[in-house]
Image (spheres, coloured by chain):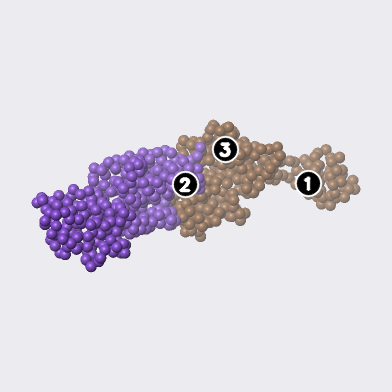
Amino acid sequence: MEPTVEVQGLVKRYGPLAAVDGIDLKLRAGEVFAFLGPNGAGKTTTVEVLEGIRPRSAGKVRVLGHDPWTERAKLQRRVGVIPQDFSFFDKITPTEAIQFYARLFDKRPDPVSLLREVELEEKADDQFEKLSGGQKQKLGLALALVNDPEVLFLDEPTTGLDPQARRTVWTVIRSLRKGGRTIFLTTHYLEEAQSLADRVAIIDHGKIIAHGTPGEIIERFGRPQRLVLEGPPSLAKALEGWWRRPVSLVNGRTEVEVQAKEEILEVLQWVSASGLAWSGVGTTRDTLEDVFVRLVGRIDEGGSRASEPGTDAKGGRT
Amino acid sequence: MRPSRVAAYLLVFARTYLRSRVGLFFSLIFPIILILLFGSIFSNTGSSSSPVYVQNLDGTSVASQMFLTSLNATGAVSVHMVSSSVGNLSTWLVSKGYTAGIVLPAGFQASFAAHRPVKVIVYTDPAQPSTAGIVQGAVGYAVTSMNYAQSGQAPVVGTMELNVGSTTYQYIDYLVPGLIGFSILTSPMFSMTNIAAQYKKQKLFRQLSLTPLTRGEWLAASVLWYLVLVFASTVVMLAVGRGLFGATATPTLLTIPFLIFGPMLFVSLGLLLGTFSKTPESASVVGNLVTFPMMFLSGTFFPVSLFPDYLQAVAHVLPLYYVIDGLNNTMVFQNTTGALTDLLVVVGLAVLLFLAAIRAFRWQEE
């Protein structure tokens, strides 16, 4: 089956700066694909090239078999888009907005059921400027659905929303998958990627540094499983001298890397025989967040990279 | 260009405009306030006849009546009789705050009949040079016509400089086309400069670029909306001007193209100015810089013919001048040739700027 979205060697330069620096992507029909990265990583530039509102510097891009820049008109009828910070005419109501889009696309959707689908039917006749951030975003979703698209591009659909509004938008996005619709989503929220996406690509400084299902990414980039022991720092010290794999002290707990369950028993027998004090025991493995922090660094609520010595957060567009 | 898409955006734009009220105030209500204001201030002093107070000390003699008839015939002054019991006319005029008076001396008839020189005394206020000029001119005309009558020749009517121009048309006749021009200029200019920059900032252009709506359709719908506003404003201006102030301005078929291409010109110009501005704030500054001088120098509030020569030269390079001159030519002077010349300039500029605006403004970014 032909991929819904196919990208090979995409490059987008702004002067000397390569905002997107040679990326490859392939989306399967019906999947939710999350493009994850901090601000300035190249997410929005990539999605805008895919939407056909920005030309590319190099590479091959196909959406539903069409070049989005040269065959924009053909694609417009088959894709739906919510741009980053979606906004609309202040004085227009959601019902009027849907009627407007319906006339532009020459479609006959039912505004009431469309607004019900995005949980906005109660605000159907309120002017756009009176809607909350989450409600505005839901109108964006409803408008993206007017032409009954095969592919949806959602560029940071929940950025700037409070956690409550974010969750309701997630619920709506999940319901949009039905009918085999492909969804391409950019985000800097790990939780969003983990909770919505079938597959994830992590982008940083214009390059994809990891991709696959969340499980695959953890498998590939995460550290091995670890045995966690509650005990005094002297316990960590003693284990470090004896055990052949890395041992570390994290938040006052001793973490011991193990590769097989036999090794867990081996460590526990040694600790028991040593007579050192210890209380609790458990195991831990990396989450997507651990992997992300190790690959990209920590990012704050607004999507910006927390300051890290030695790395230079690239400016420019996200 | 698909009419259904133009209509769809026109509906959104009209709703936005009507619901925001500010735009509506400036497009329809503000010009009404202006016509009421300027109409009331200038319709008396600027009208054809200046009041003049005449004291006839020669009773009801034939000669004095002849003089007064001639004076009346100029149409430039309205004669008010003052009783001969008033002692010094000059003092009386000052006490009443009047600015012009005439004394026909006793024995006027006798001197006239006897071919003896006789002096008519004219009082004018040097601080009111226009009234003074009108009164002196009218008296001069009356004196001349009496002299002609005396020598047996027919009075020569209409050679007097006063009865051209300033007496044929009233101020309000210029004001109606002028304020229609004001609407044609200001409603599109102020809002289009702002819209171009505001839509860019709010990313509404990007939003529209994701739909099948084209830039040409968008601009055409905007022009259509201002046509609606300008036609509405024209109807109101004519109704108020004619109804309240007795304006004679009458629209003809040739008025209509000015009401179509005028808004098209200024919608396009406004969009161009907004497109080249980085922020909504700078857009409104640039819009004001272009709009205000054009508003005052194109004959909106006062006829350009009253301006000094160098300002008239400036007016001739302003697009609005040709709109207002054209409206005057069609609605007031019935000067078809003049109107067609103006129309040629307006249509040329409108088409040029419309095409330039479509080329210049982008709704995608590089």
Q: Tell if the residue under mark 3 belongs to the same chain as the one under mark 1.
A: yes
In space, the residues marked 1 and 2 are separated at their CA atoms by 60 Å
The answer for which chain carries disc 1 is A
Q: Tell if the residue under mark 3 belongs to the same chain as the one under mark 2.
A: no
User: B344 and B153: which one is in front?
Assistant: B153
- As helix, strand or loop, the secondary structure at mark 1 comes to strand
Q: Position of residue A154 (x, y in %)?
A: 55, 46
Q: Where is residue A45 in the image (x, y as percent from the top left)?
A: 56, 39
Mark 1, mark 2: which one is toward the viewer?
2
Q: Verify CB contact (< 8 Å) between mark 3 and mark 2.
A: no
The answer for which chain carries disc 3 is A
**Tag 1: amino acid:** Val
Q: Where is residue B352 in the image (x, y as percent from the top left)?
A: 36, 39
The answer for which chain carries disc 2 is B
Q: Which residue in the structure is indicated by mark 2?
A: B285
Rendered purple, the chain in question is B
Hey, which quadrant is residue B342 in on the image?
Answer: top left
At 36% across and 46% down in the image, what residue appears? B297
At 57% across and 46% down in the image, what residue appears? A156
Q: Verify CB contact (< 8 Å) between mark 3 and mark 1.
A: no
In space, the residues marked 3 and 1 are separated at their CA atoms by 38 Å
- As helix, strand or loop, the secondary structure at mark 2 comes to helix
